Image: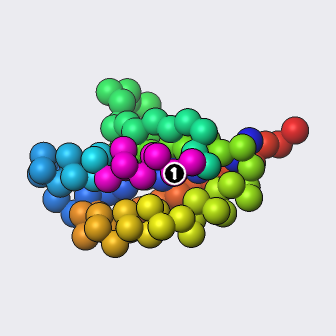
Amino acid sequence: MFVHHVYFWLKRPSSAEDLQALVDGLRKLSAVPQIKSFHIGRPADTNRPVIDASYSVSWLNIFDSAEDEAIYQEHPMHLEFIATCSHLWERVVVYDSAELV
């Protein structure tokens, strides 16, 4: 298993239109065949010192392997998503993880 978790900070975090455009783009991108499951979320209403809730949208993807995630990176749908949605965000942070055991 390979986990690809992406966090987006919108340029205009109070814009409902920008939020919807990003979510729509992620839903469309989630159809890439190598993605086995995904979750689109927003910061939860939790408050502990270890929680960073400064992002606008998170997108969690599960792949069968690092090779599948590499295919996704070059997939035309991924490249189209970047081309059409990158104007919406000011920052993106990615956390990738592979199985430990």
Quarter holding the C terminus is top right
Identify which residue is drawn at 66% across, 63% down: 70
In the foreground, 80 or 38: 80
The residue wearing badge 1 is 32
Image side of residue 68 versus residue 90, left or right: right
Q: In which quarter of the view is residue 63 placed?
A: top right
Which colour assignment does the render follow? rainbow
**Image spot of residue 80 (x, y percent):** 38, 67
In the foreground, 62 or 7: 62
Q: In which quarter of the view is residue 67 placed?
A: bottom right
**What residue range appears in magenta?**
25-33
**Image spot of residue 8 (x, y percent):** 37, 55
Looking at the image, residue 100 lies above or below residue 25: above
Can the viewer see residue 54 in this picture?
no
Quarter holding the N terminus is top right
In the foreground, 1 or 47: 1
**Image spot of residue 72 (x, y percent):** 58, 59
Image side of residue 38 versus residue 54, left or right: right
The amino acid marked with disc number 1 is: Val
Q: Residues within 10 Å of mark 1 (few under 14, many from 20)?
A: some
Identify which residue is drawn at 42% across, 52% down: 29
Residue 90 is inside the magenta segment: no
**Image spot of residue 39 (x, y percent):** 46, 36
Q: Secondary structure at mark 1?
A: loop
Looking at the image, residue 80 lies above or below residue 60: below
Can the viewer see residue 24 in this picture?
yes
Image side of residue 1 versus residue 62, left or right: right
Identify which residue is drawn at 20% across, 46% down: 20
Looking at the image, residue 17 lies above or below residue 70: above
Identify which residue is drawn at 34% across, 72% down: 83
